[in-house]
Image (spheres, rainbow, N blue to C red):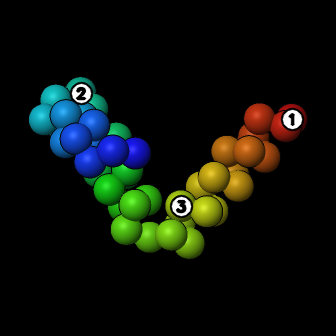
Amino acid sequence: MRADAIRQLHERRETEDLAEVLIDLEAEPILRLGVMDALKDSTRR
């Protein structure tokens, strides 16, 4: 996700938590892959 989009999310109170999650996912590749796998698995059911 683009940094400017994350910044915009962070500036809005209702999406600030989402921005924090996206920042964490950007910083932790293994965590990001785990989340992506979990999301893929959840859509296959």
Closer to us: mark 3 or mark 1?
Answer: 3
Mark 1 is on which residue type?
Arg
Q: CA distance from mark 3 to mark 2?
A: 22 Å
Closer to us: mark 3 or mark 2?
Answer: 3
Residue pointed to by mark 2 = 14
Decide if residue 36 is in sight here. Answer: yes
8 vs 24, nearest the viewer: 8
Horizontal and vertical percent for residue 27? 37, 68
Label disc, if present, on residue 45 of the rendered structure: 1
Q: Residues within 10 Å of mark 1 (few under 14, many from 20)?
A: few
Query: Considering the numbered disc 2 on the image, is that residue within a helix, a strand or a loop?
Result: helix
Image quadrant in which the C terminus is located: top right
Query: Considering the numbered disc 3 on the image, is that residue within a helix, a strand or a loop?
Result: helix
Horizontal and vertical percent for residue 18? 34, 41
Q: CA distance from mark 2 to mark 1?
A: 30 Å
Mark 2 is on which residue type?
Glu
Find out whether the residues at labels 3 and 1 contact each other: C-beta distance under 8 Å.
no
19 vs 6, nearest the viewer: 6
Q: CA distance from mark 3 to mark 1?
A: 21 Å
Label disc, if present, on residue 32 of the rendered structure: 3
Q: Earlier in the sequence, mark 2 or mark 1?
A: 2
Decide if residue 16 is in sight here. Answer: no
Residue at horizontal 40 percent and vertical 45 percent from the top: 1
Residue at horizontal 27 percent and vertical 42 percent from the top: 6
Query: Considering the numbered disc 1 on the image, is that residue within a helix, a strand or a loop?
Result: loop
Quarter of the image where one finds residue 14: top left
Residue at horizontal 70 percent and vertical 55 percent from the top: 37
Quarter of the image where one finds residue 28: bottom left
When the figure is inspected, residue 23 is found, relative to residue 41, above or below; the finding is below
Q: Earlier in the sequence, mark 3 or mark 2?
A: 2
